[in-house]
Amino acid sequence: MGEPFILINCKALSEGMGNRAHLIAEAAETVAEESGVRIGMAPVYTEIHPVSHHFRIPVFAQHIDGVPPGAYTGHVTAAAVRHAGAVGTLINHSERRLTLAGIEAAVRAARDARLESVVCTNNDPTTAAAAALGPDYVAIEPPELIGSGVSVCKADPGIIRRSVEAARKVNPQVKVLTGAGIQTGECVKIALELGTNGVLLASSVVKAPDPEKVLRDLVSLVPATRRVG
Ligand code: G3P
């Protein structure tokens, strides 16, 4: 499954750990298989192995350090998360910012370990800079809207349009996600219409009493032509 892509970031939320991580993963697997929309999950490190072992969903790390395997106590390498079962990683999330050199090293480390990379950005100039590093995805998330419950698709569609343009100009191969406040199928529909390849989200699914119900709504307006199967 390729596009569109819905990636659930569990952050360090208590609602995304332990049994809840499994419940969210199970919901993602069920809704992805029913709908033909790719749904992935970025749990805390300690859940990467169990989730990837038990569920047929793409599992992402939330961060990697751009260092090779070696004497780097406390670091998390691309190879380590790959061994644990991750197929990709977030890089430079707004809550885990890196220097430009750190982003470049992490993108390279992800590529060397055959991990998909999603570099998060906060505006269109940083989206262009991130796209130039050659990740698989850039994800534009205005920080002020993260966790606000106000959707970027409605509050600031211009930033998405400009970021898609900026990314494609620099690197036509790079795919674009958007995030911050995404909660309904309508948000996903707008994101796709604005030229993105999907969304990155957290609260609406991770904190939901019934994540499966929210995921069903999120995929509900994805056009049949963009679904697999
Ligand atoms: O990584 C996704 C995240 O930063 C957006 O959070 O809670 O606004 O969906 P939320």
Image: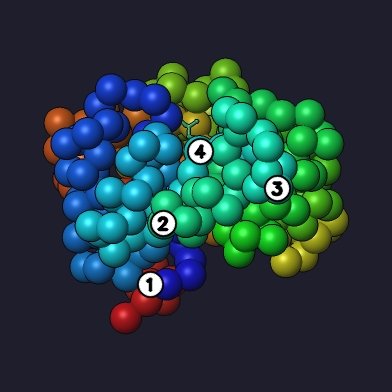
Left or right for 100, reference 6: right
Q: Residue at x 25, y 27 (%)?
A: 15
Q: Tell me the residue that label 2 is attached to.
A: 85
Q: Nearer the viewer, residue 143 or 221?
A: 143
Q: Residue at x 41, y 56 (%)?
A: 85
Q: Tell me the residue that label 1 is attached to.
A: 227
Tag shown at residue 62: 4
Q: Is mark 1 within 8 Å of ligand 1?
A: no
Left or right for 228, reference 22: right
Confirm or deny contact between disc 4 and disc 2 (CB under 8 A): no
Q: In whole angstroms, how far apart are the C-alphas of marks 4 and 2?
A: 13 Å
Q: In whole angstroms, how far apart are the C-alphas of marks 1 and 4?
A: 26 Å
Q: Tell me the residue that label 3 is attached to.
A: 68
The local secondary structure at tag 3 comes to loop
Q: In whole angstroms, how far apart are the C-alphas of marks 1 and 2?
A: 25 Å
Confirm or deny contact between disc 1 and disc 2 (CB under 8 A): no
* Residue that extends furthest to the front in the rendered view of this protein: 71
Residue density around tag 2, few if under 14, some if 14–19, many if 20 or more, within 10 Å: some
Residue 9 horizontal/vertical position (percent): 42, 38
Left or right for 81, reference 174: left
Q: Amino acid at mark 3?
A: Pro
Q: Amino acid at mark 1?
A: Arg
- Residue 91 visible in the snapshot: no
Residue 91 horizontal/vertical position (percent): 62, 40
Q: Residue at x 70, y 48 (%)?
A: 68
- Quadrant of the rendering where the C terminus is positioned: bottom left
Q: Earlier in the sequence, mark 3 or mark 1?
A: 3
Q: Residue at x 58, y 59 (%)?
A: 115
